[in-house]
Amino acid sequence: MYKVFVNEKKLLVSKHPENLEKDLRFESFTTLEIALDLLENTSVKELNVFGENIEEIWKEFQKLFRIIEAAGGLVSNPQGELLFIKRLGKWDLPKGKMEKGESREESAVREIEEETGLQDVELVEFINTTYHIYIERNGEKILKCTHWFEMNYDGEDTSKPQIEEGITEVAWKNTTQIEEEVFPSTFQNIKLIVKDFWNLKLK
């Protein structure tokens, strides 16, 4: 199953109907164009495109966009707190576009160190990939795929926001703070990856 966010609305690609607000059976490329149009231009908040061959549907879906790959991380300290950044008034996780020749892991570590000022972050394991769509000023549609990694940091707290990237704050948050402060003021795909991370920790 793939979950994509379109203007904070949810698009699922799955094998079976998911009983969302709207279910569309995949017939052709046109089904995907209709699905996007409904999410972008109507009050529909969640939609599911379903069909037997998910990978085929996903390949067709990707043809609608220019794909940008990014990487980032959920960094924990010894107290079990997670590291967040504040950008444009919203809480976010440190992440950024992958550079040519970089692995996902290298990119994730570099972006975290650049955006938060921490050094020698320890990469643990891959968590998941999130997807969201946005439109460039020139009208080009972008599908951003962000690969997320679990990381640890137990050194001196040298965190400081990368102001030139529009980041105004870097803060460690415990579970209660995440639920009460971060979740009401963040993006759907950030909530999704934090919950995926928590589920990973419960296993």
Image (cartoon, rainbow, N blue to C red):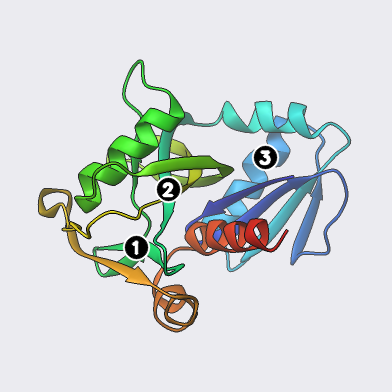
Which mark is first along the chain, 3 or 2? 3
Q: Find disc 3 in the rendering and name its residue.
A: 32
Report helix, strand or loop for mark 3: helix
Depth-wise, is mark 1 or mark 3 nearer the camera? 1
Mark-to-mark CA distance, 1 and 3: 34 Å
Residue drawn at 53 percent across, 45 percent down: 131
Kind of residue at disc 3: Leu
Tell me: residue 121, above or below residue 42: above
Mark-to-mark CA distance, 2 and 3: 30 Å
The 10 Å Cα crowd at callout 1, few under 14, some 14 to 19, many 20 or more, is many
Which mark is first along the chain, 1 or 2? 2
The reply to whether dot 2 and dot 1 touch (C-beta < 8 Å) is no
Which mark is first along the chain, 3 or 1? 3
Outermost residue, top direction?
101
Q: Nearer the viewer, residue 33 or 177?
A: 177
Q: Find disc 1 in the rendering and name its residue.
A: 84
Q: Quadrant of residue 200?
A: bottom right
Residue drawn at 51 percent across, 63 percent down: 188
The percent coordinates of residue 39 (x first, y second) are 58, 57
Tell me: residue 93, above or below residue 103: below
Kind of residue at disc 2: Gly
Q: Quadrant of the N terminus?
A: top right
The percent coordinates of residue 59 (x first, y second) are 67, 26
The percent coordinates of residue 71 (x first, y second) are 42, 38
Q: Find disc 2 in the rendering and name its residue.
A: 73
The percent coordinates of residue 183 (x first, y second) are 46, 74
195 on left or right of 49:
left
Mark-to-mark CA distance, 2 and 1: 10 Å
Q: Quadrant of residue 106?
A: top left
Kind of residue at disc 1: Phe
